[in-house]
Amino acid sequence: MDSSFSTLIRTASHEAHVEAETSSFMSDLLGGRLGVAAYARYTEQLWFVYEALERGAGRLAADPVAGPFVRPELFRLAALERDLAHLRGPGWRTGLSALPATRVYAARVRECAERWPVGYVAHHYTRYLGDLSGGQIIRDRAEKTWGFRRKGDGVRFYVFEGVPNPAAFKRSYRQLLDGIRVDDLEKQRVAGECKRAFALNTAVFRALGDEFPLSA
């Protein structure tokens, strides 16, 4: 059996990952049963999470464990802001608001960035590799459902112009994970943090589902 660290965290978080992917909100969004307002609100919540991830990245660049994961070609905040300007208009910042579940999620990311760099890697992994994988399904559905120009404004978040070969990038990312120099106990803690990251994400989806229930 593959005993690599990347396999450990993928296996440990599989159930939580599936729960996030199959949330009612995401199922309704991908199924075209929700309007563009729900998509815009979801994009708004992503801004808070990535603000926490990327504002904390600078101080981690020199960290021996987290530093190699700080890759500018992954940064999403500027793309999110361009999407929000398209979705909400030029004054999008004035109406920006985080759901309580989003505030909890972002606070945990910041806490890890400030106090536990290896834990920050868990959030980095769950977000960015997810964007490069399942995120592309969201982009495709958004383009077809709401008529966004292919890989244009409204879906810029999902377009990694600095990653021309996502499959190769993901392989190299997993190699970085496998090369992390921490003991087995810490690896188990990181696997647990990956599960927590997916649970925090699911809580945001649940809150969005409450805000955008399907009409009977």
Image: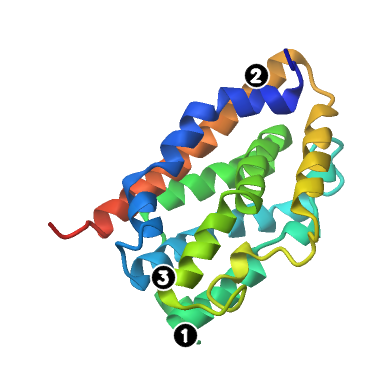
Relative to 96, is 163 above or below? above
Q: What's the CA distance linking mark 1 and mark 2?
A: 44 Å
- Observer-nearest of 214 and 189: 214
Q: Position of residue 10 (x, y in %)?
A: 63, 29
Q: How many marks?
A: 3
Mark 1 lies on a secondary structure that is loop
Three-letter residue code for mark 1: Gly
Which residue is depicted at the point 43% across and 61% down? 42
Which residue is depicted at the point 80% across and 40% down? 171
Checking the image for residue 91, the label placed there is 1
Checking the image for residue 188, the label placed there is 2
Which residue is depicted at the point 66% across and 63% down? 76
Say left or right for 50 vs 61. left
Three-letter residue code for mark 3: Thr
Label 1 with label 3: CB-CB less than 8 Å = no
Relative to 206, is 43 above or below? below
Q: Position of residue 100 (x, y in %)?
A: 37, 51
Three-letter residue code for mark 2: Gln
Checking the image for residue 31, the label placed there is none
Q: Which residue is mark 3?
A: 145
Q: What's the CA distance linking mark 3 and mark 2?
A: 40 Å
Does any portion of residue 97 appear in the rendered image? Answer: no
For mark 2, does the 10 Å Cα neighbourhood hold few (<14), some (14 to 19), or many (20 or more) residues? Answer: some
- Observer-nearest of 89 and 117: 89
- Observer-nearest of 3 and 75: 3
Viewer-nearest of labels 1 and 3? 3
Relative to 141, is 207 above or below? above
Which residue is depicted at the point 59% across and 45% down? 109
